[in-house]
Image (tube, rainbow, N blue to C red):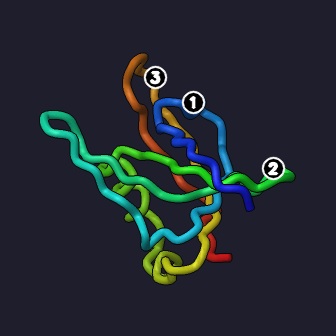
Amino acid sequence: MKKEFVTIKWSEFPRNAWIRLVFINPSEASVIAIPHKRKYVYYKAYFPSMKEKKLFNICFPYDMFKRAIMAIPQKQRRELTRPVQCELMKTGKFKGRGGDMQIRAWGVL
């Protein structure tokens, strides 16, 4: 797997499209707080649908991601030290706003 020094932000995701991701080790998240703004959480991830897997950082607004994770049943989110695959979708109609997040097909690999 190639390591890329790229960060993909939540604002760069397309709206109303399911995107499949694999989080390498969800327990190793980095939380960054920007004064007078918001908190963000970073994960190492890759797209499983690509032939050549390239590792990158992915950044989500902390509160939004935490809310979406809490909707997943407790049994499924217990094992966070192994890679986790899921599908994410950005929803919302507001231009210039981050939109909401939906998660489905959460599973430990």
Kind of residue at disc 1 = Arg
Which residue is under mark 1?
A: 15
Kind of residue at disc 2 = Met
Tell me the CA gap for discs 2 and 3: 29 Å
CA neighbours of label 2 inside 10 A, class few (<14), some (14 to 19), many (20+): few
Position of residue 80 relative to residue 12, above or below, is: below
Kind of residue at disc 3 = Lys
- Give the SS element for disc 1: loop
User: Is residue 69 toward the left or the right of residue 38 in the image?
Assistant: right
Residue 5: percent from the left, percent from the top?
57, 46
- Give the SS element for disc 3: loop
Which label is found at residue 50?
Answer: 2
Which quarter of the rendering shows the C terminus? bottom right
- The residue depicted at 48 percent of the width and 58 percent of the height is 43
Residue 64: percent from the left, percent from the top?
35, 47
- The residue depicted at 42 percent of the width and 53 percent of the height is 42
- Which is more N-terminal, label 3 or label 1? 1
- Residue 104, by quadrant, is bottom right
Disc number lying in front (2 or 3): 2
CA neighbours of label 1 inside 10 A, class few (<14), some (14 to 19), many (20+): some
- The residue depicted at 59 percent of the width and 50 percent of the height is 56
Q: Marks 2 and 3: CB-CB under 8 Å?
A: no
Which label is found at residue 93?
Answer: 3
Q: Could you say which is closer to the camera, residue 95 or residue 24? A: 24
Disc number lying in front (1 or 3): 1
